[in-house]
Image (cartoon, grey):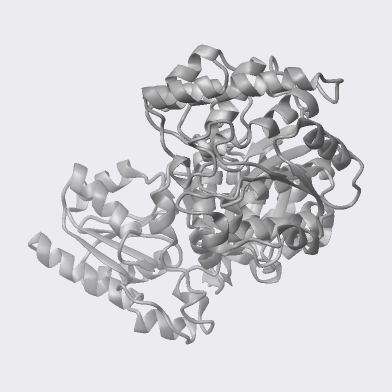
Amino acid sequence: MSGRTIDIDVLKENARHFRKEILEMIHEAGSGHPGGSLSAVEILISLYYYKLNHRPDEPGWPIRDRFIMSKGHASPVVYVTLANCGYIPKAELKRFRKLGSMLQGHVHAGVPGVELSTGSLGQGLSVAGGIALGAKLRKVNFKIYCVLGDGEIQEGQIWEAAMTAAQHKLDNICAILDYNKVQENAPVAQIKNEEPLADKWRSFGWHVIEVDGHDFKRLISALDEFDSVKDKPTFIIAHTIKGKGVSFMEGQPKWHGKAPNTEQLETALRELGF
Amino acid sequence: MELKATREAFGEALLELGRKKKKVVVLSGDLEDATRAEYFKNEFSDRFFNLGIAEQDILGTAVGLSLDGLIPFACSFAAFLTNRAYGILRISICYNKRNVKVIGSHAGITVGADGATAQCLEDFAITRVLPNIIVLSPVDAIEAKKATYAMAEICGPVYMRLGRTPFPVITKESDPFTIGKANLMRDGNDVSIIATGLMVSEGLAAAESLSKEGISARVINMHTIKPLDEACIIAAAKHTRAIVTAEEHQINGGLGGAVAEVLARNEPAPIEMVAVLDTFGESGAPDELLKKYQLTAGDIIRAVKKVLNRKGI
């Protein structure tokens, strides 16, 4: 499953279904993080349905591409992706956040296909860097993809990791920023402005690509561009909309970490065409 | 008596491990000269990474290296690795059960002249509350080597504290070392001195003095803070009915606290703790600091007399 020809319309239809399943599982759980899950749907689909070299029936395949979801609260989009790829049964989604479930509230390594438990923000990029460093050391050629949140990169560790990846010329690592511009209590720019973001990452020695993070063609072309970058890590700034696809959630901080009630779920699903 | 720093022995053992195990990789926070990880670096530069002054990234990178079967040793000062990077130790390493060896040198008050910022006095307290981790505190250079080799054979998180200052070498190559199994250094009937690191030597000196007064003290080398050898502690409490702990660590939450927890749950007995009394250290010579912060054989003797008084002798 890598770099194959792809029907964009099929991906779009997948995205619509992913959003439905994300909302349903958060509703069922009674809590969870819809905003930053809905914003990352196209990113995850582009990775798992187009870019990643992976085998859902063999999660430990040694030369698989690695995926780290550093913003661990966006677990719904990860679990829905893994369920649709066949890593876990779809029925498991109903057990999200419940006692004894493998689907812990934040991304959990006990789930087949998950490399790292995350949830304490800012930790994933260092780990991705370590995998990349190890791959270089062992001279194996898989790639490492790491999705970051925009609020998350306020953590200092991210910038430590950014310097490490550049210093060691880790061109096997591609970080993708889900730049939905809204964090838990307010817009990012009002809390700790990160702009000029592209300039920041370029000045840290990364190859930076900016795309519309809901446009499959642009995302795919950015992921392909990463393959041709040598001697530096790649940073894709994916401009997204928090809560994408549900009008009353879009751009709203209050939907960062709140479950829709039954009525809200029905409204949302209608908007998505269900 | 031979004196040798545990960090020195660690550096030698790490180099030896590097020769034996190609999967061993070493990360440093620009302190490999001080932690002695430079011995490894000099021979295996391809497997050595100085990631700069970035302890959080060092532990995170170590986790990434471990994910594909490498055995990373992350080396820096205890104060920076366990304090600055605690959240990474907690989640990326311990929650994820990663095979990362965290080596914190320059622990304890005997760091000396560098003063309070480098003198890590809380590493036992903050590491031992984390699930999945093993916490080691070798008594001398010989034991530090054994501990280094032993942790490489275990798959899982390990933290080991090392000292900067040469410690008396009080064990032999032939002595057993098993993680989680305390070593009896001297048997006795009236009181048990449970110590770790440098303070074991002080405990032995105290026991020797006490014997001249007719007080028979058992001395236990508690080289593993977690998992704690509870059976050894309970047996000591049953037999001697009085316990003194001794450590180069804050009085709250360290070995003394851990032993007290075991006693309270299993075999209540009076306990006195020789430790740093809820204060930061300062600059000075190691010997001067040990004296000022009441971490000497004399302080252990005073604690023994106090606990014996409480015991009713």
Considering only vertical position in the picture, is B121 above or below A206?
Answer: below
Considering only vertical position in the picture, is B60 above or below B200?
Answer: above
Query: Residue B160 placed where, x, y %?
Result: 53, 55
Quarter of the image for residue A66 reads: top right
Taking depth in this image into account, of B280 and A154 the one nearest to the observer is A154
User: Is residue A6 left or right of B113 when viewed as pictured?
Assistant: right
Residue A87 visible in rendering: no
**Label total for image:** 0
User: Is residue A229 left or right of A46 when viewed as pictured?
Assistant: right
Query: Residue B227 placed where, x, y %?
Result: 41, 44
Taking depth in this image into account, of B214 and B34 the one nearest to the observer is B34
Residue A271 visible in rendering: yes
Quarter of the image for residue A203 reads: bottom right
Query: Residue B69 placed where, x, y %?
Result: 70, 36
Query: Residue B88 placed where, x, y %?
Result: 54, 51
Considering only vertical position in the picture, is A27 above or below A250?
Answer: above
